[in-house]
RNA sequence: GCGCCCGUGGCUCAGUUGGAUAGAGCGUUGGCCUCCGGAGCCAAAGGUCGUGAGUUCGAAUCUCGCCGGGCGCGCCA
């Protein structure tokens, strides 16, 4: 609908450029929905924009533009208002075509060719497999999944990927934590390291290990602790303490046994994460393992390639990347003095790998605490030959969690956190998914659990689902009353009251909302729209009866509400929320 | 200290990339089913858009300075 109007105006401008206007200007045509009924259906500010450039009276310019607009069935009339706005009043038939389109297209209603089939690799969540997903990850999951579906609806080909950090030091700490808990199950007594993973799930993994493998990983605690530097609470350094324990664990168990302990932790937690995400309605096309980068020498390959540039140097025994050449605050280490790769080195390799996949766009969704990390990764990608524009990093602010007034600590290490699973069980998948995307992603979010729980019954998601269920209910009533829906018998001209006009306008906006929201990477726009659409429907429902004796009117109203139903159902699906037929 | 994000009714947040009289939800107050589902509808009250300047026909939106909050500034991940 909007596209058609933009086309008309561009024709008019082109025509004018052959007469009065200079040909070398390229104004951006902006046609927007009018805020108020008195200003028509759409409004265009092009005369104001042009007036500035060519120094002419905007109202006269508007008059000239209108004179050049091609004739169309859709527009009833144009009006010049205010400083020089052109208000567009549509013919009702223009809206009726949208209802037809919705009914014809069904579950494809709202899909747009905008993306032209361009491919997008969207990486999101990618939480370290060192513990269960918590409510902080939930926001990234809900946002990423909704964005993926949104982009898909807007004509992009989306591949969803989870990057599994299964090779870093944190994983060694986890494996060692599991082993120490296992030793406790073997009746060894000692103080658990302050920097170890303390969550109950570590006990569970250790218990499984003990049940399945018996005491085969058992080592006397004296042998484990001999020569280990003191932990922080005992006046030592917690990092040195845990690192020494990791090394001891590896030597005492040997490569194979260590791997077994390590993998038991990794596999169990990963399975847990996958199950959580699946039940949260989040699916991935690919799980990429960091270990793959090491096993296939992709990191050294990437570093070698980077070294061919002039942006890599040796200093203090370490290998540095001169990211400051590309606007980063300082240079970054890739290989440490002790020969170990940094996390950054692995990330360079991973992003190089992604570049090689020849996607049109790469999108990463990261926690906002990683924002300082963006310049160095982009810098590396430029050196590796990537297009600067290719990578987009979207930052999701962390959700600060409250239980009433009390702020809850959120630390995977200390084991104190509310899991995504707990949240889902308390407020439900639909409400949780919707609640997360109702906020703009870069907006800080105070998430009060008490509030979320207590309000779960009048959560806005039910309002929208209720609208959908009501429409389904109308369909059931229809047959109970001995009618059937006859789409072709409708006389759409009969839809004229205020509620119907409003609702027609709302439905016609749905395809535009998909495009605008996708373009801005903002699923929350869709969430707000769905609430607006539901509001217009509920008002209509309360004001008028649909199942009336007059067949032409009845079917016209049914056509309208079934069009609404498609918009609701399709929109909810994108947000990962179900559209129930009964509630 | 430097960098990034943010500041909009009592609370939680929108505001279509600079447009016309700044909008919702929750909460508060008052109304509405003999009728397709009351998880609904209608109405009222509530605002110096943190603050001071600047840019222009026009600013919640763009620029700069302050105030306040969050995050980041490791050979951690």
Image (spheres, coloured by chain):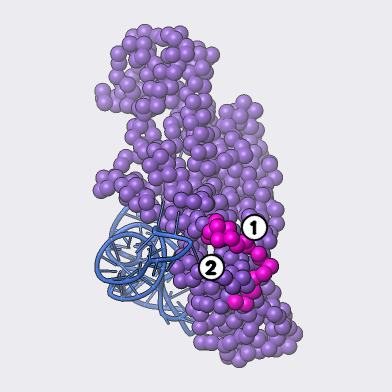
- Identify the disc placed on residue A546: 2
Q: Nearer the viewer, residue A520 or A351?
A: A520
Secondary element under disc 1, as helix, strand or loop, is: helix
Quadrant of res A33: bottom right
**Residue A485 sits inside the magenta stretch:** yes
Q: Compared to A329, does A422 lie above or below?
A: above
> Badge 2: how crowded within 10 Å, few (<14), some, or many (20+)?
some
Q: Chain of mark 1?
A: A
Secondary structure, magenta segment, majority class: helix
* Residue A376 makes an appearance in the image: no
Chain letter for the part of the structure drawn in purple: A
* Residue A211 makes an appearance in the image: yes
Residue, far right: A18
What is the display colour for chain B? blue
Q: Position of residue A247 (x, y in %)?
A: 44, 18
Q: Position of residue A22 (x, y in %)?
A: 69, 84
């Amino acid at each position: 609908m909007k596209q058609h109007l933009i086309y008309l105006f561009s024709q008019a401008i082109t025509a004018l450029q052959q007469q009065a206007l200079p040909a070398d200007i390229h104004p951006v045509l902006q046609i927007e929905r009018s805020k108020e009924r008195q200003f028509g259906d759409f409004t265009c500010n092009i005369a104001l924009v042009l007036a500035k450039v060519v120094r002419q009276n905007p109202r006269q310019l508007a008059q000239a533009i209108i004179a050049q607009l091609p004739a169309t069935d859709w527009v009833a009339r144009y009006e010049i208002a205010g400083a020089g706005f052109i208000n567009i009043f549509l013919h009702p038939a223009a809206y009726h075509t949208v209802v037809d389109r919705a009914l014809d297209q069904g579950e494809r209603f709202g899909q747009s060719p905008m993306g032209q089939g361009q491919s997008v690799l969207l990486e999101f969540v990618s939480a370290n497999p060192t513990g269960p997903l918590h409510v902080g990850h939930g926001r990234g999951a809900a946002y990423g999944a909704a964005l993926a579906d949104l982009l898909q609806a807007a004509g992009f080909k989306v591949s969803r990927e989870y990057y599994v950090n299964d090779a870093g030091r944190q994983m060694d700490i986890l494996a060692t934590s599991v082993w120490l808990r296992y030793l406790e199950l073997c009746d060894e007594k000692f103080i658990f390291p302050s920097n170890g993973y303390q969550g109950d799930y570590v006990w569970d993994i250790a218990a499984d290990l003990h049940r399945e493998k018996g005491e085969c990983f058992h080592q006397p605690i004296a042998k484990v602790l001999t020569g280990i530097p003191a932990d922080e609470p005992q006046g030592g350094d917690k990092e040195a303490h845990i690192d020494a324990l990791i090394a001891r664990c590896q030597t005492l168990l040997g490569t194979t046994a260590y791997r077994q302990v390590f993998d038991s932790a990794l596999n169990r937690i990963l399975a847990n994460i996958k199950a959580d995400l699946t039940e949260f309605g989040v699916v991935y096309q690919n799980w990429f393992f960091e270990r793959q980068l090491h096993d296939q020498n992709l990191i050294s390959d990437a570093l070698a390639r980077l070294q061919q540039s002039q942006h890599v140097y040796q200093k203090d025994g370490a290998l540095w990347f001169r990211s400051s050449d590309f606007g980063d605050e300082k240079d970054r280490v890739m290989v440490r003095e002790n020969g170990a790769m940094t996390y950054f080195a692995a990330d360079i390799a991973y992003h190089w790998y992604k570049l090689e996949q020849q996607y049109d766009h790469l999108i990463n969704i990261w926690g906002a605490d990683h924002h300082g990390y963006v310049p160095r990764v982009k810098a590396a990608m430029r050196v590796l030959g990537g297009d600067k524009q290719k990578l987009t990093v979207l930052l999701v602010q962390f959700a600060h969690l409250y239980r009433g007034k009390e702020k809850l600590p959120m630390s995977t290490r200390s084991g104190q956190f509310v899991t995504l699973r707990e949240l889902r069980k308390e407020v439900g998948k639909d409400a949780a998914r919707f609640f997360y995307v109702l906020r703009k992603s870069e907006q800080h979010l105070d998430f009060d659990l008490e509030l979320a729980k207590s309000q779960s019954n009048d959560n806005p998601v039910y309002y929208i689902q209720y609208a959908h269920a009501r429409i389904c209910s109308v369909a059931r009533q229809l047959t109970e009353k001995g009618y059937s829906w006859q789409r072709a018998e409708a006389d759409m001209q009969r839809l004229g009251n205020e509620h119907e006009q409003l609702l027609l306008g709302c439905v016609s906006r749905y395809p535009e909302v998909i495009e605008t929201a996708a373009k801005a990477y903002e699923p929350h726009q869709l969430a707000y729209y769905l609430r607006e659409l539901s509001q217009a429907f509920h008002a209509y429902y309360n004001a008028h009866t649909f199942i009336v004796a007059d067949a032409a009117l009845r079917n016209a109203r049914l056509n309208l509400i079934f069009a609404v139903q498609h918009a609701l159902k399709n929109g909810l699906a994108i947000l990962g929320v179900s559209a129930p037929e009964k509630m």
